[in-house]
Amino acid sequence: MDKLILSKDNLPKFIDELIKKNTVFAPVNNNDIVIFSQIKKANEANFDFLNSQYPPKALIFNQTETIFKFKPGPKGDIEPIKIDEKKIIFGIRPCDAKSMAILDYAFSGEFKDPYFLTKRNTSVLIGLSCMQPGVNCFCTSFDDSPASSKYVDILLTDIGDKYYVEVISDKGKQIIKGENKFFKPAKESDEKSKKEAEKKAINTIKRTQKTEKIVEKLDKIFENKFWKEVADRCIGCGVCTYLCPTCHCFDIQDESTLTKGARIRVWDTCMNPEYTLQASGYNPRPARANRVKNRVYHKYNYYPKNYNVIACVGCGRCIDLCPVNIDIIDVVTRAGEVKP
Amino acid sequence: MNENPYEPWLATIEEIRQEVGGQRPIKTFKLKFKDKKIQDNFTYFPGQCAMVSLLGMGECFFAISSSPTKKGFIEVSVMKLGKVTTALHELEPGDKVGVRGPYGNNFDINGWKGKNLIFIGGGIGQAPLRSLIQYVVDKRKDYGKLDVIYGARTSKDISYKEEFAELEKRKDVNVHLSIDVKEDGWKKFVGFVPDNLLQVKPSPKNSIAITCGPPIMIKFVIQNLEKLGFSEDQIFTTLEMRMKCGIGKCGRCNIGNLYVCKDGPVFSYKQLKNIYGER
């Protein structure tokens, strides 16, 4: 791993150089909401942000995406599309970078998802440590840190008057190689400053989710009335799933005119009753309690069973934006205390 | 498997057979891939499924209802219920559909060699069983006694009528048909499938029971199989759920941590007892 220093003056210059050669996405203010958007100039980016409201997973697993085109009807034909879109995601938070690694499990395996994996494998994640985590942040509950370099290609950490830069992957090295002039080697004192900054950030995280033995505990309370109590407040809007950086459910729909059409994949949510409704009218998850439970189990029981990792990164979006204040930290912690 | 698992191959409808008419009609579509190489390489086992689509209307997940011992085509049996199945029912021979697969696991055709097999089907649930029945009949000497129990609401609702008639002619297959309510001229069993099962009373010795049908039927069939002394690892079923991807990614067909499309659709009752989740 290379340890470098980037001065604050050089940050925009570095980004402008990257923009010349790459498609660069960064956090941008959009009517008071920060979202990752493509930038044409470094000064369009806003790095003074907590996190984007919309998870940057949307750049890899698009909310709406054409999977192929076709000439519709019983005499129709299929027209494959080219998947490209190599991009740099600049300023991604360590939690969101981790979510991409979690999504890798769902989209790889026996059947490889070419749309997700092509974009994922060609994209470069340049992370920005989170120095002032939000009130509902809890990445530390999963032994992670707001300044973790584990899941990014390059990590920038603000250490006061400059950025401490950790170059993690080969993809990261390739990026730095071309822009050497903006960087200088880091000193031992810089590394110490990063560790101190990281410690300070960790200490500002006040909330903890208790996930010890959560898989086993959930195994025992599937039929418990606790889930109905949790669901009583839920209005089924699904915002928790749309804003979740690890949710990967989708729908596939055909859209067409008389002469042309496309098969489209769109994000879907297990909060919708239609999600599991069968053509016969039968629905295996008819009640909101079934659906609320599915969301929690998918993240804290099924995903760990299948891939050995909890599918939550502690970004806090679902807590911040739930219209009825359902709090996943509280739900999971309380679920762990329910008597089977 | 196509390099892009979401991209179907085109197949031509060679033949359409109306299995059942009425309000919930069933048709069997005989499909042949447009590209001969794909047709030749499309290998599957009884129990596996395929995604079939009409371009512009969408896709549905169906059990392949023909046996791999029948070469050069695949068949799916479709009940007209929703948007896609209604559109499929309007198609004619020569029309093209998209097909991708095969998906899911399959019946244990090798492990069950030498065993007595009891098939218990209801309604459109016979489709996946049909594939296995055709298979074991084509390889008759590999298997023990064969009992085929099947029921429908009325005699008009019985699918694969001609094939049942053919099976009834054979001395080495026992067919036990039933209808739910009494009809003039019906001399076979009247009543629900689980009751017909009790009356047929197959022995659990060296036997495997395979059931598919409406959820309520499966529930009582399993209860009655247990009454007859079948253990939970002698009972198999094949499930269905609403599906979109067929490859374990879109999320909706899970029962607990298992996806019906990828980890199923064939499950032993032993497995099902040990996973929780709505189904």
Image: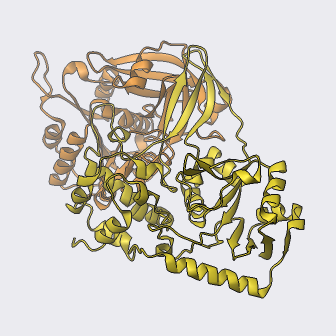
Chain colours: A yellow, B orange
> Camera-side residue: A210 or B188?
A210
Q: Position of residue B148 (x, y in %)?
A: 28, 36
Quarter of the image that includes the N terminus of chain B: top right
> Camera-side residue: A277 or A271?
A271
> Camera-side residue: B90 or B116?
B90
**Picture residue at 77% right of the left edge, 68% below the top:** A8
> Camera-side residue: B56 or B101?
B56
Q: Position of residue B230 (x, y in %)?
A: 23, 55
Left or right side of B54 for B144: left
Indicate whether B144 appears above or below A1. Answer: above
Q: Quadrant of residue A136?
A: bottom left
Is residue B258 in view from this perspective? yes
Left or right side of A246 for B226: left
Q: Quadrant of residue A152?
A: bottom right
Q: Position of residue A42 (x, y in %)?
A: 76, 54
Left or right side of A94 for A243: left
**Picture residue at 45% right of the left edge, 40% below the top:** B46
**Picture residue at 80% right of the left edge, 80% below the top:** A186
Indicate whether B82 appears above or below B258. Answer: above
Total labels: the figure holds 0
Q: Position of residue A175 (x, y in %)?
A: 82, 61
Is residue B259 in view from this perspective? no
**Picture residue at 64% right of the left edge, 39% below the top:** B2
